[in-house]
Amino acid sequence: MPVMVECVRRLLDSGLDFALYRFPGDKEPHLVLQTSGEAQALELAHSRASNANSGTLLPGNEPSGFIFAPFIETAKTPALLIRPDVAVSGWELIDLETRELGKHRRVSLSSIELEDRTADIEQSDGYKVAFRSFKYQLDRENYQKLVLSFSQLKDWEGAGHEDELFVRATERFPNSMVYLVYTRHGGRWFGCTPELLLEGYGMKWHTMALAGTRTWEHGEWNAKNIHEQRIVSDYIEGQLQSLGARITRQGPYTSKAGHLYHLRTDYTFHLNKPTSPLRILELLHPTPALCGLPKMEAWNFIRLFERNRRMYYGGYLGPLNLRAETNIFVNIRCAQIRPGGKALFFAGGGLTRNSIFSEEKDEIKRKMDTLLAALS
């Protein structure tokens, strides 16, 4: 462990933009490091529009690197692409690539706005008011589903010790993508996400529908969770069919992530021509698991009435067109690491007509506890 911890410490001390991540089921992590300048701000709407008609992957025209995209793109929280000046896999190569970084130490700064959100969910009037407005719309069947998020700034011993935190989390969360990302624009982010959004290249791809949450493995799922999983599955299948995809489905089945269990359905799909991952991401993000249905109407409602600023929570991240492959995960179970031993934790829950305030509130707390368990 000492060598692993030292590698992470070198990266953090360098002040360079980087992404250190470990995929579910893997033993060794990967590193994408940009050795000069800042991560590029991508205009995804423009990029997707440029590919919308052809849907074809054009060599040389597609961005390549590690993408870190927000739930809603704004001037303060743009989609960021870390350029792969260094892209290596395994602790041995990461050690070799980071040994010289100490000679070029920079000050780690962030231009992202820092907000204080210290209220616990039990005392949060904002969450309570937002829940009522969301539920009012659901009861009147204006939406099939809406996702309500919450964030809280907490004292956390992991903040300031991200080197040990990352290594420990890779051991505690074998079925999640564990990541540590730093950009000068977005700051430091840490997460353990079990939710794949898109992986593959060319014409063969894989995605999943992940919805429903509980703390026990066996037994029947309740109607609310089954309904939520069906909403997400139906949406994904419809979006893939719009691409003319040939779809193979596995599930739904119970899947473990940390201390929580979810309903999961896997989709392998084939397209009739090589397709840009940005084009597919446009159709999949945000899924009903993070947004709601109808998609654009729910997205606009959340943007106007949620009260909680999601920033990069609920967005997506991962290597994009790196060595011709793409592996993108939804950014859940995450925290923005703050100075002074603090972190801003995020969680959310899908609301339907069957949602009960006390149950949704408890689910938010359980999800935040899952991330805190990385240090327990």
Image: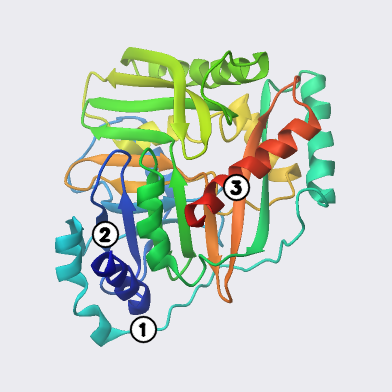
> Which circle, 3 or 2, is nearer the viewer?
3
Neighbor class of circle 3 (other Cα within 10 Å; few <14, some 14-19, many 20+) is some
The disc label shown at residue 106, or none: 1
> What's the distance in space between the residues labelled 1 and 3, CA to CA?
33 Å
Tally of numbered discs: 3
> Horizontal and vertical percent for residue 358?
79, 34
Looking at the image, residue 4 sits to the left or right of residue 255; the answer is: left
| Above or below, comparing residue 286 to residue 182 in the picture | above
Neighbor class of circle 2 (other Cα within 10 Å; few <14, some 14-19, many 20+) is many
| Above or below, comparing residue 244 to residue 358 in the picture | above
Neighbor class of circle 1 (other Cα within 10 Å; few <14, some 14-19, many 20+) is few
> What's the distance in space between the residues labelled 1 and 2, CA to CA?
18 Å
The residue type indicated by label 2 comes to Val
**SS for callout 2:** strand
Write down the residue under mark 2: 32
Residue at figure coordinates x 85%, y 50% from the top left: 125
Whichever of labels 1 and 3 marks the residue nearer the N terminus, that label is: 1
**SS for callout 1:** loop
Whichever of labels 1 and 2 marks the residue nearer the N terminus, that label is: 2
Residue at figure coordinates x 50%, y 45% from the top left: 315
Write down the residue under mark 3: 369
Q: Who is closer to the viewer here, 35 or 116? A: 116
**SS for callout 3:** helix
